[in-house]
Amino acid sequence: MSEQAQEALETQAPDRYECRACGYVYEPEKGDDKYNIPAGTAFADLPTNWNCPVCSAKKVAFANIGPTGTASGFKENLGYGFGVNQLTPAQKNILIFGALALGFLFFISLYGLQ
């Protein structure tokens, strides 16, 4: 394997896993304080008796949701729409709440028309 390929594998963020029962997201960068799991522990390396710290669901109830900062959804669907499908969840939140704030400001500005 070339050096560039090894560097890419080392710098790639580990996948996060979401509990399908309650929505808790296990992030390997943070670990789990409730069960004394240190930061940097991959989901596959968790003990077999580890449960969700929120709802106590077993490990099999978790689904891989990919690394942090990636666009959500299936890769084949990212090209559809007006480019919104390629946004990360944080960018989508800024777009949604920014539009709501702008709409509210326009609504409030109507009181200035007298």
Image: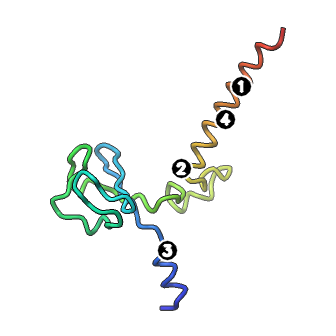
Q: Earlier in the sequence, mark 2 or mark 4?
A: 2
What kind of element bears circle 4?
Answer: helix
Compared with 92, 48 (above or below) is below
- Residue 107 x, y percent position in the rendering: 71, 20
Q: Is residue 34 above or below residue 40?
A: above
Among numbered discs 1 and 4, the one appearing first in the sequence: 4
Callout in the foreground (3, 4): 3
Apparent side of residue 96 relative to residue 68 in the rendered image (left or right): right
Residue receiving disc 3: 11
- Mark nearest the camera among 2 and 1 is 1
In the image, taking residue 87 as reference, residue 5 lies left or right, namely left
- The local crowd at label 1, few if under 14, some if 14 to 19, many if 20 or more residues have their Cα within 10 Å, is few
Q: Residue furthest bottom?
A: 1
Distance between mark 2 and mark 1 Cα atoms: 24 Å
Q: Residue at x 56, y 57 (%)?
A: 77
Mark 2 to mark 3: distance in Å? Answer: 21 Å
Quarter occupied by the C terminus: top right
Residue picked out by circle 4 = 99
Q: CA distance from mark 3 to mark 4?
A: 34 Å
Residue 41: image x %, image y %? 31, 66
10 Å neighbourhood of mark 4: few (<14), some, or many (≥20)? Answer: few
Amino acid type of disc 2? Pro
Who's the residue at 51% across and 82% down the image? 7
- Of the image marks 3 and 4, the number of the one nearer the N terminus: 3
Above-or-below relation of 40 to 97: below
Percent position of residue 29, x then y: 39, 62
Query: Label 2, on which residue?
Result: 89
Label 4 near label 1: C-beta < 8 Å? no
Task: Report the Cα–Cα distance between label 1 and label 4.
Answer: 10 Å
| Badge 3 vs badge 4, beta-carbon distance below 8 Å | no
